[in-house]
Amino acid sequence: MTQPVSLNSLGRVHFVGIGGVGMSAVARIMVAREVPVSGSDAKDLPVMKELEAAGARIAVGYSALNVGDAQTVVAGSAIRRDNPELEAARAAGLPILHRSEALAATMGGDRVVAVAGTHGKSTTTSMITVLLKEAGLDPSFAIGANVPSLGVNAAHGESDIFVAEADESDGSFLNYRPRIAVVTNVEADHLDHYGTPEAVFASFDSFAALLPADGLLLACADDEGARSLASRTRAAGTTRVRTYGTSGDADIRLHDGGPGAVWLSVRMPANGQSQTGLPLPAGERYRLELQVPGRHNALNAAAAFAVAVELGVAPEMAAVALGHFTGASRRFEFKGEGRGVRVYDDYAHHPTEVLAALSAARSVAGEHKVHVLFQPHLFSRTREFAREFAEALNTADTALVLDIYPAREDPIPGVTSRLITDRLTSGRLVAGGKEATEAVAAAAGTGDVVLTVGAGDVTAYGSQIVEALDG
């Protein structure tokens, strides 16, 4: 954990890996806030042309010469230490910031809403941003996924509100100084970084401790990890703590409202006075008509509703605005339909996320079947959660599993996708490419739902499956 640096102290900023979704988000905001920006990436990605058009100096390919006259260098966790631009920056004695440190610098004195959690961060951050924009508050925002209704994943807003997705995967969410913190859930994940589940839980305690005395921690009462965090933070007495969820003791409570709808109510304590600490009358109920399926999205909407009300949005307006949210890229994103089969794509890469995505697919499929093409992400995650992945995938009618997407990791002896497929009741390992596409298309019938799932390149299969169905 470091103290945030001042945006004015950075000078000319060079981004190593500027094409990444997180890096481009920070660069986009810095350019809008008139910071001189340059950047490079291994490939020529569309977002780089957008940044260049906005005023950034862009290079394709890594070279020490790209650092040029930079006074600060920013690099994400995925950049290798021997990258020639990082080596040039170290040789020149330039400060090198993690992406999260650079983002924290752009926040300055804004009122920061930071959304953390093992799952649901991007969707919840997107919901909050869309809601606030519809309410006329025009926040700055940085999200780990593109949001179709916003057009971009990051922007400079005119208000003093900054909404940001806070990534816990490498502990970098401790670089922010939020006024409102949302914690959607706390589970063991990213053990390649943390080592133990206990270290994961401790990092969220440190995150909650960043809140000021008049700040607000909003935690999901339906998740054991987030609920425990709320209890510990409330006992510490360092900041305000409120909960949301279907649990009877949640401050903001969800009620089933029938297909596509939920009700939100404010807990009525024995004395008849609202104890939520939010400007909401106890006992009032607000109806949400959501366009995104799944119980997990209803929980995300409850969190967004509470944030908006805390920031002064009328609850009735917040409820209506949430009904206009259509989703974020790769979060149960509709890819097309062929032969009466609907195809969706989801970024889920943890067992809980996979189960939630399949539950949403089941609610969309109704009486028809659900077929999933799953790509495990990381050898270490597959080793730790193979049994849980299989249990989640067994809720589908057909589960086809690709080889592990390694991302930043080297192979681990004995760790393959068979650790998952050997536990499946109705699924198997499938080779990539044409074999996977044809296998999915052959399994699906009219009215069924197909879901491609994973944080790797499995996302490319969605459109290919639609084409195969049409063919």
Image (spheres, rainbow, N blue to C red):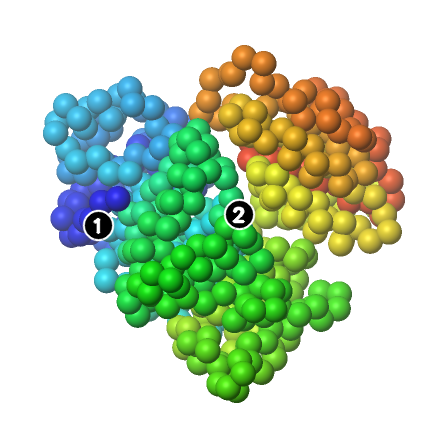
Q: Is residue 265 left or right of residue 183?
A: right
Which residue is most to the top? 413
Locate residue 41, reporting x and y percent.
Answer: 36, 30
Query: Quick one: quadrant of the N terminus?
Result: top left
Mark 2 or mark 1, earlier in chain:
1
Camera sees residue 344? no
Q: Residue at x 50, y 57 (%)?
A: 227
- Tell me the distance, in whole angstroms, between the alpha carbons under discs 2 and 1: 26 Å
Locate residue 407, reporting x and y percent.
Answer: 49, 26
Closer to us: 244 or 441: 244
Residue for badge 2:
119
Q: Amino acid at mark 2?
A: His
Closer to us: 309 or 59: 309
Mark 1: few/some/many CA within 10 Å (<14, 14-19, 20+): some
Q: Amino acid at mark 1?
A: Pro
Which residue is most to the bottom? 272
Residue 170: assigned label: none
Residue 4: assigned label: 1
Locate residue 381, reporting x and y percent.
Answer: 53, 29
Q: Is residue 143 above or below residue 420?
A: below
Q: Is residue 33 left or right of residue 388?
A: left
Query: Quick one: quadrant of the C terminus?
Result: top right
Camera sees residue 439? yes
Q: Residue at x 50, y 86 (%)?
A: 271
Which secondary structure lies at badge 1?
Answer: loop
Residue 395 sits in which quadrant? Answer: top right
